[in-house]
Amino acid sequence: MRNIKLIIEYDGSRYRGWQRLKNSEETIQGKLESVISKMVDSPIEIIGSGRTDAGVHARGQVANFHTKSTMSIKEIHKYINHYLPQDIIVKEVKEVSERFHSRYNVKNKKYVCYVWNHWVPSVFQRKYSHHIADKLDIGLMEEAAKKLVGTHDFIGFSSVKKTNKSTTRTIEEITIEKEGNMLKFTFVGDGFLYNMVRIIMGSLVEVGLRRKKISYIDEILESKTRSMAGQTFPPEGLFLEEVNY
Amino acid sequence: MRNIKLIIEYDGSRYRGWQRLKNSEETIQGKLESVISKMVDSPIEIIGSGRTDAGVHARGQVANFHTKSTMSIKEIHKYINHYLPQDIIVKEVKEVSERFHSRYNVKNKKYVCYVWNHWVPSVFQRKYSHHIADKLDIGLMEEAAKKLVGTHDFIGFSSVKKTNKSTTRTIEEITIEKEGNMLKFTFVGDGFLYNMVRIIMGSLVEVGLRRKKISYIDEILESKTRSMAGQTFPPEGLFLEEVNY
């Protein structure tokens, strides 16, 4: 069996997230599976690097699928993009070793989250950033972010229900850049729990707006309690930027 | 009478251009006039720096209107943005001298045009750039663009019908920058005839695709004949970036 790796870009605005649901038209995975299954004329299951929530975008989601098809890589690439809707694009197609697995082999992932921080919103960034009118203190948020870098039990920053699986993850890097009115938050880590980036964002913003002190982050980490943390940040500013293997 | 200057940003995708038509809901000017007239409770006519075509965007369109209203600038700004649709935003409001006129006083304008130049389209740039799959030769286009800089009769590069008005304009600068797969064309000039930027773009692309030689530009300038020039470029990649006074 051939093993085909895809790098996928999507505008998540009108989807219910990555993971296939009964109605395949509403998810990215569903859309891809329906196009690829038609292409190879047999039902195909694609393996994604992980889920993205409803409304979250991706510039570098990775998935793979197995097939006996003899189509060339270029033919596969053209076929898929021809039949995908305009808000999903396969950027790269590559044949990989049979053992490659998009989820199990992840080394790290990079998420980026955009905040438009000015009282006048932006027309062009509206669908791709979250608008916060009140001025955020970047220095305070950077200090707070430092407390999250490293290996921690992030259960307090997640919507994970009771689980036997480990909720310890390592965040390698968090950076905050400002360009004009746009703030760009970058998160690199070996894995992120359900809603983890969005709950971290919501908590950092509490600090940036001076509603909470920097020690708030320690309190959430120590308490391991979701209800301590900030709100789950809206999805429209969040992008799965890269998945590295 | 107070004279109020506005700097306006809009996503032109769903409008029939700047200029008011009978159905005010379909144009940017119409939308603004209906909000501002309601605000001051009398019919207001706003003067724009010039028209933009259907589908063309703006980051820095300028307009002004006269009013006896005693509202503060901040109140005006908040009111207008509150009632405008999400694809039109007033970025700045300023009270200016009574003699300021958005069209007559223009010193120069800057237009920017984006081309996504890769066979795989971009999901996020789709509405804000024109997609050209075949590789464009930037060096050739830069050479061709040089021939347009300066003072020329640009009638061959416009959709202007027979006219007694001058069709001579001065282009101060044309630059082409590449960032990844995106090409950014910048045009600065004292004025642009109807469709002029789009017809120049269509003609430069003919050169960039090696369908025409650089001398093609001279031929259009000399012939002063619209039919010699390239196609009118699609509007979705074009932005009115700045109007300077």
Image (spheres, coloured by chain):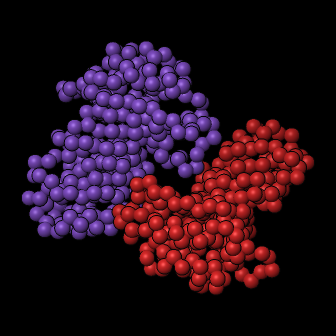
Chain colours: A red, B purple
Tell me what residue is drawn at x 22 percent, y 37 percent. Answer: B107
Q: Is residue B165 visible?
A: yes
* Quadrant including the N terminus of chain B: bottom left
Residue B216 is drawn in which quadrant? top left
Front residue of A155/B98: it is: A155
- Residue, far right: A1
Q: In the rendered image of this protein, does residue B171 appear above or below residue B1?
A: above
Q: Is residue A34 left or right of residue A240?
A: right
Q: Position of residue B14 (x, y in %)?
A: 42, 52
Q: In the rendered image of this protein, does residue A170 appear above or below residue B152?
A: below
Residue A52 is drawn in which quadrant? bottom right
Tell me what residue is drawn at x 77 percent, y 43 percent. Answer: A94
- How many numbered marks does the figure carry? 0
Tell me what residue is drawn at x 36 percent, y 66 percent. Answer: A119
Q: Position of residue B17 (x, y in %)?
A: 35, 47
Q: In the rendered image of this protein, does residue A173 appear above or below residue B173?
A: below
Tell me what residue is drawn at x 46 percent, y 57 percent. Answer: A178
* Quadrant including the C terminus of chain B: top left
Residue A242 is drawn in which quadrant? bottom right
Q: Is residue B224 left or right of residue A140?
A: left
Q: Is residue A9 left or right of residue B132?
A: right
Q: Is residue A47 visible?
A: no
Front residue of B103/A164: it is: A164
